[in-house]
Amino acid sequence: MHGMNQDAAYQQGQAKWELVADTANFVVVYPNGISNSWDISGTRDIDFVLTIIDTMANRYDIDRNRVYLSGFSMGGMFTYHAMNRIADKIAAFGPVSGYPLGGANYTSSRPVPIIHVHGDADDVVTYTNLPNYIQGWVTRNNCPTTPVITKPYPSHLPNSVATKTYWGPGDAGVEVVLMTIGGKGHWHSMDPASILTSVEIWNFCKKFALDLSEPVVSFSKPVGETSYVVMGADPQAAIESLTFEVRATDPDGHIDSVVFFNGNTLLYKTATAPYTFRWENVPAGNHQIRAMAIDNEGKTGSATVTVKVEAPQTAHTFSQAFTAAGTLPAGWMTYDGAETRTGFQSGLSSGCRVFQLTGNPRDFNFGLYVRNTSGEPKAGRAILGGTTSTGYVMVNPGIYTLKVSCANWNMPTGGNVTCQVRSLPADSTMASLTFLPTSNIGNTMSNPFSGSSQQTLWFQVTQPTRLSIHLYTQDTPWADFVLGSLILTKETENALTESRAQFATTYGQAQSALSAASDPMYAGAQYSALSALITEYKQWQSDNISAYETAINRLKTATNDLMEHKAAIDATETEITIFASLFTGNAGTLPKGWETYDGSTSRIGPLTGLGQGCRILHFTGSPRDFDDGLYVRNINGNANEGFAKFGSTATDTVLTLKKGKYRLSYRVCNWNMSGFGAIRGRLINRTTGSVIVEKTVTPTCNIGNSPGNAFTGSSLIDLSFQLDADTPGSLEFFTADAGWADAIVSDISLRQVVYTTLPKNLDVSSKPVNITYYDLRGMKLKGPVRGLYLVRTIYDNGKVTLEKIVAN
């Protein structure tokens, strides 16, 4: 068997087998591989070799008990592949300068004789891991663990650079030999001063022969251990059917029948080739399916294949966790841009494989590592249940979630991972998600690790469907990922209803967030993005849980972005006092701008020397949380007859409010009522009379005229409101509509909310229309002053800025 990118003629030129065959009287075949390579993981070229054997037997009547296989480089890799697949057809094996780089697989059907020749300076298929790999075959063949070493070899050539390491004999008398050629590279050595490789291989192989007097049996379908997962099925009939097919031959007679067993339970018997069996209603469990061939003399031969069927009915959850380093579990297939691997492999030390992670913290101990050596699209992939893997996933009607936990391995900036659920045999995509893992797990603790990413895909099936689960690396050279776990769950029947309810809640929260940020101050890309989603999903509904998952995530992301944007602007918020009245030191007066009425007397400030009726009172005794307050009473108890107003049309004072955001606060209590009377405070549009903001409260205390009256603190009222245009205002307070109802109001403060730093999203290219100056207490100034002061600017588009200025 030739090497990669070589051919039969090249192999003939370097191996020169005919020089040995002509004297030893055997037939040599130099086959050509498709595209000058060999299938070292599948059955294509295994079938090719079996066809060659049959052809040689028919044409030259060769001895089937003495067929040997040797290959160079990739041909050597294929030689080991053949050991595991057709050891019942090949008596001995002679690989040269080639062995499986992807890891070990010692699953031959019998102990096998091996002679391996390799240069220790080989820079193509390196020698480094070869001794450990050979040791695996020593163990498989049950050979003595201590070898016999001959150096130099042959011993009669003192200048030979070859060393012979021999283990044997093992089970069935087989031997293992490693010929190491010192200082030699990647070549087929035919050096008379050292060893003639083809001669050494022939002298080794000719000692071994098969005993093919018994029937020879092998499974052609399925090949190797196979894993099936069936979600939500009847536990007594997890799989509708599985088909088994075997090859059965007899060297000295003919096959009478083939019998299939599950363990020791008879399943089926057939006398017709091809020997197939269709197993109906396959139950869940681990099944050892044995095919036994019976020949015309009553002799038997058997082959066994393992079939694993998982059917999780109770929890409706299938979980794939990885527990064995250096393996590729059954049901999986990987490709890294150069090498394809299928499940139930072990001894893997590089490339795509399960490995154990070192260091802490880690949130999984084992993971399936996948890489993309070429950077080509989908060249780095892992597939569970695909057409090229050993097994499948079957789901019955229902709604499913697939959760995968992933991290990158050794990518400094991370790399996207794509997860897909695909239906078979059409291979159409049912659900897909591309994400960037949140961590780069690395091989050392110096790599950042914040926990692997658990991603969720939703999908729905309406009829029994075969699935395959695909994960792809990013399309860049040496992109990678590590898959920690995979969980497939059949959801409850009301999962769609729950998703709709969750969507409705999220949509409502998004609407509330949009309303809270309706002030033009918060305008920007974040507001626009959420507003667009609110419109998009206004009448939206779906029967697809995955669509709800996507919609919920979009709304949550946009809502969070807007709230973070709003919080950043709110952090720059400050207040300027527009109007304040503490009534301090003004007992017996009614200040300018105020109007009162008690059902009998109407008063308009400024007034002084008032000894009764509506006026400012100074309170004696303690405790009190204000010293002075405006007293209002309602003598008759008629509606709206007991009031105090600031900036009403009856006064010559106007409370001018510019467009913007405001806060109003004040304190209220009753004066001398046996019980308590409600007090209504409000701000109105002086021109139209419409209410801007209003609050009615029953005070928590009756302050009284002496300390003997109960007092637990006046009621503090805080109100916020927004004005979309400049507005003339009037501030009003009313007693309850009852005879001699009263109210005391104090600590009135009306403030405009402004921002010390202008948000980046605001366009202030418009023209300033008003500039006002304030000191740090919020008191208005006539103009700029020395020291620190504030400048408030209003633009013709309604935007407001506030700057701190230091002037010398």
Image (cartoon, grey):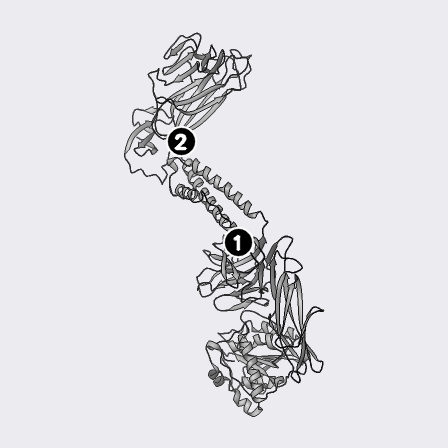
Give left or right: position of 656 versus 23: left
Picture quadrant where residue 631 is located: top left
Residue type for callout 2: Thr
Q: Is residue 93 above or below residue 469?
A: below
Q: In front: 667, or 160? A: 667
The residue beneath circle 2 is 574
Q: Is residue 528 above or below residue 463?
A: above
Q: Where in the figure is residue 314, as x and y percent of width and height? A: 65, 53
Circle 1 sits in a helix, a strand or a loop, which is it?
A: strand
Q: Is residue 692 above or below residue 132?
A: above
Identify the disc placed on residue 254.
Answer: none
Q: Is residue 50 visible?
A: yes
Give left or right: position of 333 versus 216: left
Q: Nearer the viewer, mark 2 or mark 1?
A: 1
Q: Where in the figure is residue 495, as x and y percent of width and height? A: 56, 48
The residue beneath circle 1 is 459
- Among all residues in the image, which is located at the extreme bottom? 23
Q: Where in the figure is residue 20, as x and y percent of width and height? A: 55, 89
Q: Is residue 169 visible?
A: no
Residue type for callout 1: Phe
Picture quadrant where residue 390 is located: bottom right
Residue at (44% x, 61% y) in the render:
475
Q: In front: 632, or 275? A: 275
Picture quadrant where residue 79 is located: bottom right
Mark nearer the N terminus (2 vs 1): 1
